[in-house]
Amino acid sequence: MCGIVGYTGDSNATIPLLEGLARLEYRGYDSAGISILADGKITTAKRAGKLAVLVAALKEKSLPNGQVGIGHTRWATHGSPIDRNAHPHLDPDGKVALIHNGIIENYHSLKVALENQGHDFSSDTDSEVVAHLLGAEYSRVNDLTAAMEKVCKQLQGNFSLVAIAVDSPGTLVGARRNSPLVVGLGDGANFLASDVAAFISFTRRALEIGQNQIVTLTASSYSITNFDGEAQNAREFEVTWDASAAEKNGFPHFMAKEIMEQPKALADCLLGRIDEKGQLALNEVRVSDDELRDIEKIIIIGCGSAFHAGMIAKYGIEHWSRIPVEVELASEFRYRDPIITRNTLVLAISQSGETMDTLMALRHAKEQRAKVISICNTHGASIPRESDGVVYTQAGPEIAVASTKAFLTQIVAAYLVGLYLAQVRGIKFVDEVRDILEELDEMPTKIERYLETSERLKELAEEFQSAQSILFLGRHVGYPVALEGALKLKELAYMHAEGFAAGELKHGPIALIEEGTPVLVVMPSPHSPLHDKMLSNVQEIQARGARAIIIASESDLAIADPRAIRIPDAPVLFQPLLAVLPLQLFAYESAVIRGYDVDQPRNLAKSVTVE
Ligand code: AGP
């Protein structure tokens, strides 16, 4: 997820562009850049690092005073966050500049075709490929809108694009598919941006751009077409949010926004994972197939939610690849003198890529000659940099301290590693892996369906707000979900909460149950061999007075409780991607009721860079 903004108007474009980027930094902040069209040429400044680095560079050497320009603040998906990978990107002749938010799935084949035509690239990004395509089309048709139409038809994946061209003064052209793009209609100036936060201090008049549409914008006019050049209508609306709410896209907290972003985060995590031969491809794994075939043991390391994601992933990785998997708290790993050989694969899971416990554990594993693949959401962070390979979760920035979309995509990224190992080692045929991926592709829609209908969690949070302690039960892949639900409630509502493997209850914890004890139960899928055992566990705790709230599949007829929380049916190994949602929402509502700082809970940090 990146922040993009375009300006065309009567003032020096650098000023509104920088202000817009500052409002969009929450969408990505590993590099930033601006291009200005002035005096018949495009001048560009771009820097790795936060926007402040670019601002300082512009104080040293300002851009020309031009009235049209584009700006970008990046959350890297392809290519590490260094100057040359920052946007905007230009075509070889410098006639066109372009910014991009999204993931171009077929960029590799497009890049190879352009290289065969003699194109040289200065970056590792998918976006620069689009800039070259646009420059080539523009030089053919000499019309930026028509050129954009031709380019968009060649692209697969998600994109919102904004471009300027030397021979089209005062004009911005934008296009979108699955990534956001909105027009700001000002007085003597117009904007294009990822969201209204970029221009809300200039104008509250906005225009929605629909799917597969192109907008051609000047300071005083706009026109909207589809990718075939046919005129389209657009809905104008008034932005009622203040600037802060706009950064949260209208949500009261980043956590609420990120919970609702999970369908898209998951879809983005799955983007670009199938190669031209229809095989699962993890392009940045950089551990050879032969080395992967020699792996005899996998150790997953992580902290907090990342650790819980690893616990869930263990079930899938072992089931598909038949390689034994241990899951270890990163902070414990190196002190237990783990048995590691050259045939050990360590999977280091970390959203921030800077968690010191995980980084130190990774270093220990490397010293012991293990292969290390990291699963990370932050390009260029220490953990992926020090790993042999990486699978990026592609979830976009996660601002709230409490992990939600990162947690979900960590599970899926680790599952992809398990499927890749099964494919490489011949345990699963390519079509078997593809069948599983097709089931995974259905999950974003199921998650969206649950989130659209989810209610009652606020009521439940109100009902239990004075509880002294809340227990969470799960079995099999539901057990780590129970642990994650308890962690969410602890870190957000500061309540005592504990997750248990339900089979363990009778070995002690059931003594905790008394009249009215709230227990959230993650019911295994009706297809799971543990479903009936969990039914017995529920009866055991209810017989002792527990107030059981059951999270059950829609088709689970064995659960008659009208107050059960229903989630869509899903394969056993994918059920955690749904079962965790009500637990995230329950913890969120519990924090809101208490008036706590949802996005920045006390005592916590988004990235714990100390051991
Ligand atoms: C999760 O809600 C917490 N914020 C915390 O447990 C987090 O998952 C843990 O600190 C690991 O962070 P990382 O993924 O950035 O390494």
Image (cartoon, grey):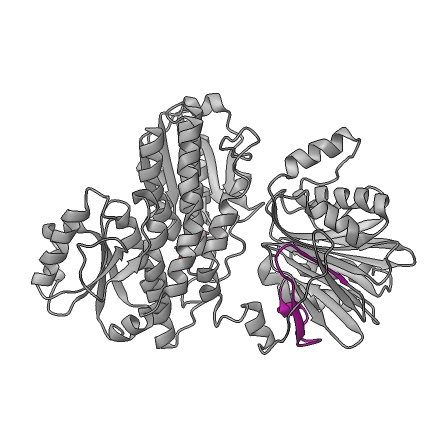
Residue 294: image quadrant is top left
The x, y position of residue 23, in whole percent, is 64, 67
Q: Residue at x 40, y 30 (%)?
A: 432
Residue reaching furthest front? 230
* Residue located 14% across and 57% down the image: 538
Give the left or right position of residue 419, taking residue 34 as reference.
left
- Residue positioned most to the left: 543
Residue projecting furthest to the right:
39
Q: How many marks?
A: 0
Image location (x, y in percent) of residue 568: 33, 54
Say whether residue 393 is visible. no
Q: Position of residue 426 (x, y in %)?
A: 40, 23
Numbered range of the magenta stretch: 195-216
Q: Is residue 424 magenta?
A: no
Q: Is residue 290 left or right of residue 29?
A: left
Check if residue 197 falls in the magenta segment.
yes
Left or right: 214 in relation to 563: right
Residue at position x 11%, y 69% in the image:
515
Please identify the quadrant where the N terminus is shown: bottom right
Q: Is residue 462 visible?
A: yes
Q: Is residue 10 above or below residue 60?
A: below
State the residue in front, 259 or 31. 259
On screen, residue 340 above or below 577: above
Q: Ligand 1 lies in which image quarter?
A: bottom left
- 426 or 66, which lies in front? 426
> Residue 402: where, in percent of width, then height?
42, 60
What residue lies at 70% left-to-right and 31% top-to-bottom?
112
